[in-house]
Amino acid sequence: MVYNSFPLMPFLVFLGIYSGIVNNQNNSRFVRYNAAQAVLLDILLIVPQILLNVFRPGSDELGQQLYISAENTIFLFVCISVAYGMGSSLVGMTARLPLVAEAADRQTSGPGGW
């Protein structure tokens, strides 16, 4: 509730995670890698939300069904990604989430970043 009540709160949380966890060399690579994947997933989820807000469906039934299907697909992707990441972390493996794993590797492997 607090997260969405302030307009800049998501951006501030992003900056806090990025600078406090991902770029902090005192944290283990495992923690920095998982935090980088979380940040990248958050960024990746902005694109469908923008598209859904720009191309809001009309009042016809087909448009509403497409909108609901898109929302459900995004939700399912997030749930599967979180479950996979948590399961991999619990057994001590590195989660390789689709679309974000390579960028997280580059971010946490050394200096430079994205």
Image: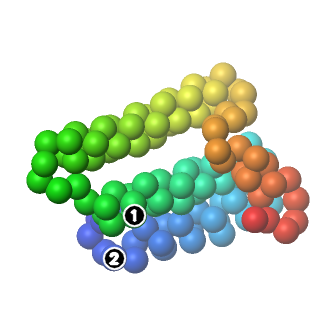
Residue indicated by mark 1: 50
Residue type beneath disc 2: Pro
The 10 Å Cα crowd at callout 1, few under 14, some 14 to 19, many 20 or more, is few
- In this rendered view, identify the residue nearer to me: 27 or 49: 49
| Residue that protrudes farthest toward the right in the picture | 110
Q: In this view, does 107 lie above or below 12?
A: above
Whether residue 75 is visible: no
Residue type beneath disc 1: Ile
Residue 10, quarter of picture: bottom left
Q: Is residue 102 above or below residue 112?
A: above
In this rendering, would 80 be left or right of 37? left
In the image, residue 50 lies at what x, y percent? Answer: 39, 64
Rendered residue at 27%/47% (across/down): 67
Residue 4, quarter of picture: bottom left
On the rendered image, what quadrant is the N terminus found in?
A: bottom left
User: Dot 2: what SS?
Assistant: loop
Mark 2–mark 1 Cα distance, whole angstroms, equals: 16 Å
User: Dot 1: what SS?
Assistant: helix
Whether residue 80 is visible: yes
Residue 78, quarter of picture: top left
In the image, residue 81 lies at what x, y percent? Answer: 53, 35
The 10 Å Cα crowd at callout 2, few under 14, some 14 to 19, many 20 or more, is few
Residue indicated by mark 2: 7
On the rendered image, what quadrant is the C terminus found in?
A: bottom right
Nearer to us: label 2 or label 1 = 1
- In this rendered view, identify the residue nearer to me: 28 or 46: 46
- In this rendered view, identify the residue nearer to me: 27 or 13: 13
Q: Is residue 4 above or below residue 74?
A: below
